[in-house]
Structures are given as C-alpha cells and as structure tokens.
Image: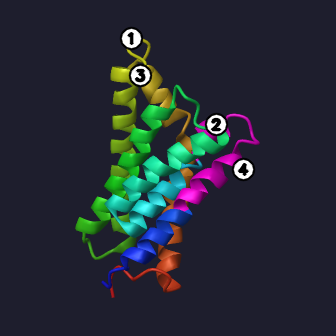
Amino acid sequence: MQQMSYLKRSIITAVCIALCLVLPFAFHAIPQSGLILLPMHIPVLLCGLICGGFFGLICGVAGTLLSHLFTGMPLVPMLPAMILELAVFGLVAGLVMTFLRTKKVYLDLYIALVAAMLLGRIVGGAAQALFFSRGAYSLAIWTTTYFVTALPGIAIQLVLLPTIVFALMKARLIPERYI
C-alpha cells in the first residue's frame, strides 16, 4: 500500500475538523439530533480511518474544542468527556487500520470502527463517572446515553463510513489498502 504524504493527511484532517463544525450545526436544527445521530463522530472516525491514529486524535480534540468555541456544542458539562471519547475514536480507528491486515478492506474497516466506538465510549463514560459527574453517573445512564439513544448514529456510522472510505479508494483519492 502506498502511504499518503504528511501534507495530504494534514489537509484531510483539516477538512474533517471543519466537518466537525458544519455537520453538528446542520443537524442541531432537529431537536436532540446531536445525541441521536452523532454528527461529530463521523468526521473524527473518518479521519482516523484514512489518516491514522495521530491525525485522528488531533481531529477528535481540535474538532470538539472548535465546535464548542464556535457553536456552543457540545455543552460545557459534556465537553471534557466528549473530547476524550472522540480523541480515542480517532486514535483507535487509525491504530487499528495501521496494524490490522486481514486482506479484506471492509473487514479491516468494521473491526477498526467497532474497536474505536467501544473504547471511545468506555473512556468517555469512565471519565464522566470518575471525574465530571462523580456520584451522579451510573451504568444505566452510560448504557442509555452511549448506546441506546445513540443507536441510530451508530448504525449510520457503520453503514456510511466504510462506504465512504471504499469509495475514496476506488476514486483514487486515497491509496488502495490492498492492491
């Protein structure tokens, strides 16, 4: 597999960070859509899958902070845990894609997505429970917030992201994973 240049990965990361501001802004016209459809998660995961763990982590942190600064979303009580969650999303998606080689693009993508989504939610929930909402956070709240309410967004991510990455490879906008 041909590696992308640092410049190209930086540009893609900048575009994904911009999407972290634009997508939630568009989705927040619908009440509670941010919590249900998870629009900020899509560009962060995409960045990690395409550009690697370092760039995915940067996208997760910078995208969340800039979205908060420019749009006020996520709200302050959710901000620290969401920064951690999305940083882990981007980092893990990128690391798994870097080191996993099943010889099947879609399998690599799904394993990377599921690993990132699970670890990010665990870190975000643990941070919320241990540091940001001590005593007011439970396993039931975590399960409801990170899985039940988010189920439509999770489904969208699992359908949309592998399709986007595969389409970008076929269009030769990013290197093919397996030649």
CA gap, disc 2 and disc 3: 18 Å
Q: Is residue 108 above or below residue 140?
A: below
Q: Amino acid at mark 1?
A: Gly
* Circle 1 SS class: loop
Closer to the eye: label 3 or 1 = 3
Q: Earlier in the sequence, mark 2 or mark 4?
A: 4
Residue 141's spot in the image, x, y percent? 47, 22
Q: Which residue is mark 3?
A: 132
> Observer-nearest residue: 59 or 1?
59
CA gap, disc 3 and disc 1: 9 Å
Q: Earlier in the sequence, mark 2 or mark 1?
A: 2
Disc 2 crowd, CA 10 A, few/some/many (<14, 14-19, 20+): few
Task: Please report the bounds of the magenta region as a residue range.
Answer: 16-38
Disc 1 crowd, CA 10 A, few/some/many (<14, 14-19, 20+): few
Q: Earlier in the sequence, mark 2 or mark 3?
A: 2
CA gap, disc 2 and disc 4: 13 Å
User: What sort of colour scheme is used for the picture?
Assistant: rainbow
The dot on residue 72 is 2
Q: Which residue is mark 1?
A: 135
Closer to the eye: label 2 or 3 = 2
* Circle 3 SS class: helix
Q: Amino acid at mark 3?
A: Phe
Q: Amino acid at mark 4?
A: Ala
Q: Which residue is mark 4?
A: 26
> Observer-nearest residue: 55 or 166?
55
The residue depicted at 34 percent of the width and 28 percent of the height is 126
The residue depicted at 48 percent of the width and 75 percent of the height is 166
